[in-house]
Image (cartoon, rainbow, N blue to C red):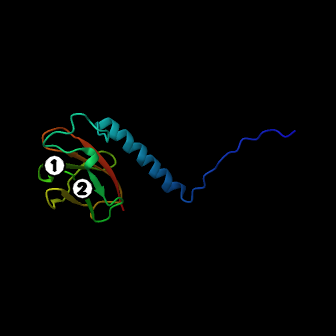
Amino acid sequence: MQKYQPQIHTIRIRDKKMNIVKIIALVFMTVLVSQLGFSQVHDENFSQPFGFDIKSVQVYPNPATDFVTIKLELPVAKRTKVALHNIIGSLLEIEMEVLDDFEIRIKTKDLPVGYYMIALRDGYSPVKGSFKFLKR
């Protein structure tokens, strides 16, 4: 009779150093998000007559090269406050333009490669949503 041998699955990683950096970065971003109170979870007070709903926000392209576009479902782009944080949580100065009542574009061309966090609020309340993206 043959003994049962559990199967062990291994993952082959081509560039271990880069993957470890990505894992550390993602873990750090998760801790940062939880510490700063950013959340992608729907908040009951979030849907206000003059606010926006986090489920109705799109951030693209991801990964980004030159620009990141934030598309809102409601026409509140002119009064939406945008903050950009790097992976360690430092607030960055950004070049931002409101394309129309529904879209905001952030210039990312001059940013170093890495992960970033966009924090949005509607001008009447604290941070209501955060979105992470990769700059290539």
Residue that badge 1 annotates: 80
- What is the residue that sits farthest to the top in this orientation? 44
Q: In which quarter of the image is residue 52?
A: top left
Q: Residue 70 carries which label?
A: 2
Q: Earlier in the sequence, mark 2 or mark 1?
A: 2
Q: Residue at x 19, y 38 (%)?
A: 126
Q: Quadrant of residue 70?
A: bottom left
Where is residue 57? Give x, y as percent.
26, 50
Q: SS at mark 2?
A: strand
Check if mark 2's residue and mark 1's residue have beta carbons within 8 Å: yes
Where is residue 88? Give x, y as percent.
33, 46
Residue nearest the observer in this picture, 18 or 38: 38
Q: In which quarter of the image is residue 28?
A: top left
The vertical placement of 96 against 7, above or below, is: below
Judged left or right of residue 68, residue 20 is: right
**Quarter that holds the C terminus:** bottom left
Mark 2–mark 1 Cα distance, whole angstroms, equals 10 Å
Q: Which mark is residue 14?
A: none
Residue nearest the observer in this picture, 6 or 136: 6
